[in-house]
Image (tube, rainbow, N blue to C red):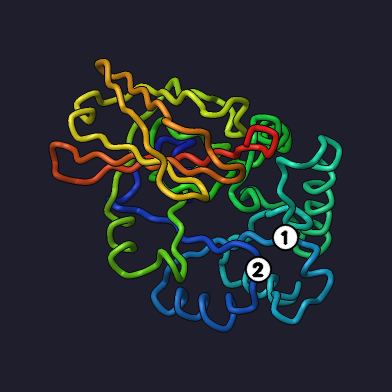
Amino acid sequence: YIINSFNTQTKLPKNTIGISIDDGDKSIITEAWPRMKKYGFPLTVFVSTEPIDAKLSNYLSWDDIRNLKSEGVIIGAHTRTHANLTELAVNEIKDEIEYSNKRFLNEINEIPQLFAYPYGETSMQVINIIKDYKFKAAFGQHSGVINETSDFNYLPRFSLNEKYGNIDRVIFSANAKGIGIYDFVPADPLLSENPPFIGFSLLDKKLAKTLNCFIFDSKGNVEIEQYIFGERVENRVKRKLNAGRVRMNCTAKGDDNIWRWYGKQFIVPNYLD
């Protein structure tokens, strides 16, 4: 519904949120969905097909998935094996998607229209392959709010879990707005230089007054120098980043006193460490 509203330019109610769960743990039917259903909250579940085919005891079964679908839960694709797609060859990436699509078609009579990258990790190579399979949208795990400049092949989602799932974070996430950003560099989430040069332009340059960006790798907070030239923002990283996932979060408070949030996830390959 949310994705379709952007495609049809239909206005959404204020503070509309989407709730999704990744991987297909059995607790979706024992804990999550009964509570969502009680309050009439819609839900999207992204599942990898191989753990289901393996009939793992802590995973959903195909019968579970069919029941969820019959009750209105949206089923999304999450590859065959939950592989890190940035580490695979092109033919392996396609096999992950095509095998998964075939299993969905056989078991629930349709191929999902939504996709989520395992671990939220992707690259321009992976994104371009995903585009070829005509998913309506693909999601990462970088925090942020969908807005008019969002890339529908790599949409943000606020992570809510045992570490970042207290009620204050839920309320903040539900009330935040996006930061309109364009001309972002580096374009590829899989970095080719370390430390990277990071820059972007603000759709609303007034947000530059309160904009703060933070970068984190496996060592923790990364010191940066932030320069703003009108609507253009440059973040210069002061040290090399550790290999693996790197997150950048930018926040700003608008004239309406509402927080804006933009997130980005990068991958530093081992050979750049």
Image coords of residue 126 (percent x, y): 70, 36
The 10 Å Cα crowd at callout 1, few under 14, some 14 to 19, many 20 or more, is many
Residue beneath the point at 44% across and 45% down: 216
Left or right: 231, with 71 as reference point = left
Quadrant including the C terminus: top right
Residue 250 vs residue 106, the one in the foreground: 250
Image coords of residue 62 (percent x, y): 76, 72
Q: Are marks 2 and 1 in contact (CB under 8 Å)?
A: yes
Residue beneath the point at 36% across and 23% down: 234
Residue beneath the point at 33% across and 23% down: 233
Q: Hey, what amino acid is under mark 2? A: Gly
Q: CA distance from mark 2 to mark 1?
A: 7 Å
Q: Is residue 68 above or below residue 85?
A: below
Q: Is residue 51 above or below residue 152?
A: below
Q: Tag 1's secondary structure?
A: loop
**Residue occupied by mark 2:** 24
Could you say which quadrant of the image residue 65 lies in?
bottom right
Could you say which quadrant of the image residue 167 lies in?
bottom left
Residue 201 vs residue 5, the one in the foreground: 201
**Residue occupied by mark 1:** 48
Q: Hey, what amino acid is under mark 1? A: Ser
Q: Mark 1 or mark 2, which is nearer the start of the sequence?
A: 2
Image coords of residue 95 (percent x, y): 85, 45
Left or right: 61, with 213 as reference point = right
Residue beneath the point at 61% across and 42% down: 243
Which residue lies most toward the front here? Answer: 239
